[in-house]
Amino acid sequence: MVQIKSKLFTDKISLLLIILNIMFLVYYVMLAFYSRPHYDDLHFLWELKQMSIGSYVSEMYYSRSGRFIGYFINGVVFKTILLVGEHRFFPILFWLLGVSICWWVAKSIFKSISQFFLFNTILLFFNLFVLTNIDFAVFNWLCALSYYILPPMLLLVISYVNKKQLSWIQRFALLIVSVILGGGQEAFTPVVLCVLFLNGLYYFKIHHFRVKEVWLDTRIRKIIISASVMLLCFIIVVIAPGNYKRMAADEFVSPRNLMGYAVGFVNAIGMFYYYITFYLPYYFILGLLFIYIGSRMQSDNLSITTSYKKTGWISLVLYGLYMLLSALPNVYLWSGFGIQRNYTHVVFFTMLFICFHAFLFGYFKMKNEWKNALNFSLKSGVIILCCIMLSNIYFDTISARNYAQSVDKRIEMLQKMNKQGVVGVVSVDPVSTPYTADPKYLLYKLLAKKTNPHPVLYYISDTEAEPNEYAFHLQKIYGFNFLIKLNNQTKSDTK
């Protein structure tokens, strides 16, 4: 068990963290403000304009995917947008939800740390989670916002099932979160179930595998109930007709033999760490913060009743299992890495793994003579992050604003033409591409790499030389009497 007691953190590091987190908030609010509905957003908006949430979920279940809770969340989001006439607050709302869950879990563990300092630490963790996600554009994709709250929800489940006593509000929250994790995303649910299985196995071990004794432990009963709810929801997801209609598409190719799976795992895990490598400087600075916290706990005579080596090895094995389980759905469906956004939760727990080991190092290995160097390095690192965010705010605001203005001008022009009675097919110019820069792009540019895709702030979609499905969705949501195509063969960047 960990008993954590510490005096207040009131030094310059706290002030720097406040400034940095304010910059992150300004950046994310700016991105949300200039965001515009993407391809599937337009599709779901016009469908929900014509049907109820229940009918929408049913249609998706039978034609597209079984993740009925995910589509229910989408239904609520898009119905709200249609009702209030505004979509830009949703990315920040989900950001707040993710931060709140992480904060709720953290404060139940670090009970005696300055709550204000702890909040800023958790805020930085979640801000870097969003910024360093290998598919950053997901953050403002309305129909995929839940990707950012699923990993914090898993943390909440772990926290609640391991408490001996829960209030009725906490029990209700555990039930709701279990339903969301069971029916929200089929690639994530098996990972969650395996985590709960290992958690339950731990209690069997400490009770020497005596079933009657284990059952008397309220924690194991919560694990079984939560896992049962998730499993039931997962079965509902898996049997959906929409899954098999979608899997018939050419994009899905499963390995044919054991060697194919082995190659697929190497490809998936290798590609993930390839992307993560470019964000290691961010994680290094975050790690310094947790080393700092661990060293402060050391000076406050924190008592951790386990060894550094044992804890480190156990966490390494658990993280390795988590990585393999997370890669399995992608290997099965794509014979390799698959879609970047499916690794959103893996980024979260990779960061958590790094922070956990940084904390252990700070507590067990940090020497007094190193602490001045640590303080200087941490302050310098936070200042560097402040400079990076200042640059992001300046340059990405220009890019995002140009993109939003080009979309708005097009819609305004098309609405005028629609009022004038134009029919048939209308030619339009491509929208401005919201380019940004990330560490990978900047490094490859410095090395003069020939192949260096330019990252974008948002998922973007457009019509083509001939009207496509995007043109159809745009026509449906705005009620145009015509379709649109591009003026020439040049296509806007899509993702």
Image (cartoon, rainbow, N blue to C red):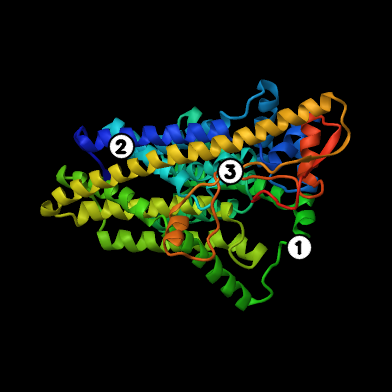
Q: Position of residue 488 (x, y in %)?
A: 75, 49
Q: Mark 2 — residue?
A: 17
Q: Is residue 71 above or below residue 324?
A: above
Q: Which residue is mark 1?
A: 250
The location of residue 175, given as percent across then percent down, is 56, 37
**Sequence-wise first label, 3 or 2:** 2
Marks 1 and 3: in contact by CB < 8 Å? Answer: no
Q: For the residue marked with disc 3, what is the amino acid?
A: Tyr
Spatial distance from mark 3 to mark 2, Cα to Cα? 27 Å
- Mark 1 Cα shell of 10 Å, populated few (<14), some (14-19), many (≥20): few
Q: Residue at 70% across / 48% down in the picture?
A: 237
Q: Are marks 2 and 1 in contact (CB under 8 Å)?
A: no
Query: Badge 3 local density, few (<14 within 10 Å), some, or many (20+)?
Result: many
Amino acid carrying label 1: it is Asp
Amino acid type, residue under disc 2 in the picture: Leu
Looking at the image, is mark 3 or mark 1 nearer the viewer? 3
Q: Position of residue 97 (x, y in %)?
A: 50, 33
| Up-down relation of residue 223 to residue 279 (above or below) | above
Residue sitting at the far top: 84
Q: Residue at x 79, y 45 (%)?
A: 469
Q: Nearer the viewer, residue 157 or 331?
A: 331
